Image (spheres, rainbow, N blue to C red):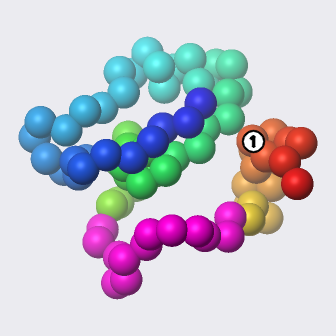
Amino acid sequence: IILSGGPASVYEESSPHLKQGIWDLIEEKSLPVLGICYGMQEMAFCNGGTVAPGTAREYGKAMVRPVAANAEAAAALFHGID
C-alpha cells in the first residue's frame, strides 16, 4: 500500500484520514506500507507519533534505505527493487 502526498497537514480539522478498518486490515494481513509526504504524516499520526515541520525543504530525489530496526518490514516492501 502506498499512501501518497497532498497539501494538507494531519493536524488540520478537515484533513483526510484512513478509517480504522484499513489500519486493522494492514496489521491483520501484515501488508507493507510506504508513506510519501502526507502519507508518512498519516502513518505517524495514526500510530501515536508526532509530526513536526522539518528544518529544510525536501523536494526531488532522495536516497531511501531500510534501518536495522525495521529490516524485515523493509525487506518485504522493497523486495525485488534494485
**Going by the picture, which residue comes out furthest to the left?**
13
Asked if 74 appears above or below 15 in the picture, the reply is: below
**Residue nearer the viewer, 58 or 75:** 58
Asked if 69 appears above or below 25 in the picture, the reply is: below
- Asked if residue 25 can be seen in this view, the reply is yes
| Side of 47 relative to 14 (left or right) | right
Asked if 74 appears above or below 76 in the picture, the reply is: below
Q: Quadrant of the C terminus?
A: bottom right
Q: Secondary structure at mark 1?
A: helix
Q: Position of residue 46 (x, y in %)?
A: 38, 40
Which image quadrant is residue 66 in?
A: bottom right
> Which span is picked out in magenta?
52-64
Q: Residues within 10 Å of mark 1 (few under 14, many from 20)?
A: some
Q: Position of residue 71 (x, y in %)?
A: 80, 55
**Going by the picture, which residue comes out furthest to the bottom?**
55
Identify the residue shown where x is 35% and y is 60%.
50
Asked if 13 appears above or below 61 in the picture, the reply is: above
Q: Report the amino acid beneath label 1.
A: Leu
Residue of label 1 = 77
Decide whether residue 55 is among the magenta residues.
yes
Identify the residue shown where x is 44% and y is 69%.
59
Identify the residue shown where x is 42% and y is 54%.
37
Q: Position of residue 60 (x, y in %)?
A: 51, 68
Q: Main secondary structure of the magenta part?
A: loop
**Going by the picture, which residue comes out furthest to the front?**
60
- Asked if residue 43 can be seen in this view, the reply is no
Which image quadrant is residue 4 in?
A: top left
| Side of 14 relative to 42 (left or right) | left
Q: Position of residue 13 (x, y in %)?
A: 10, 40
Identify the residue shown where x is 67% and y is 28%.
31
Q: Quadrant of the N terminus?
A: top right
**Residue nearer the viewer, 46 or 74:** 74
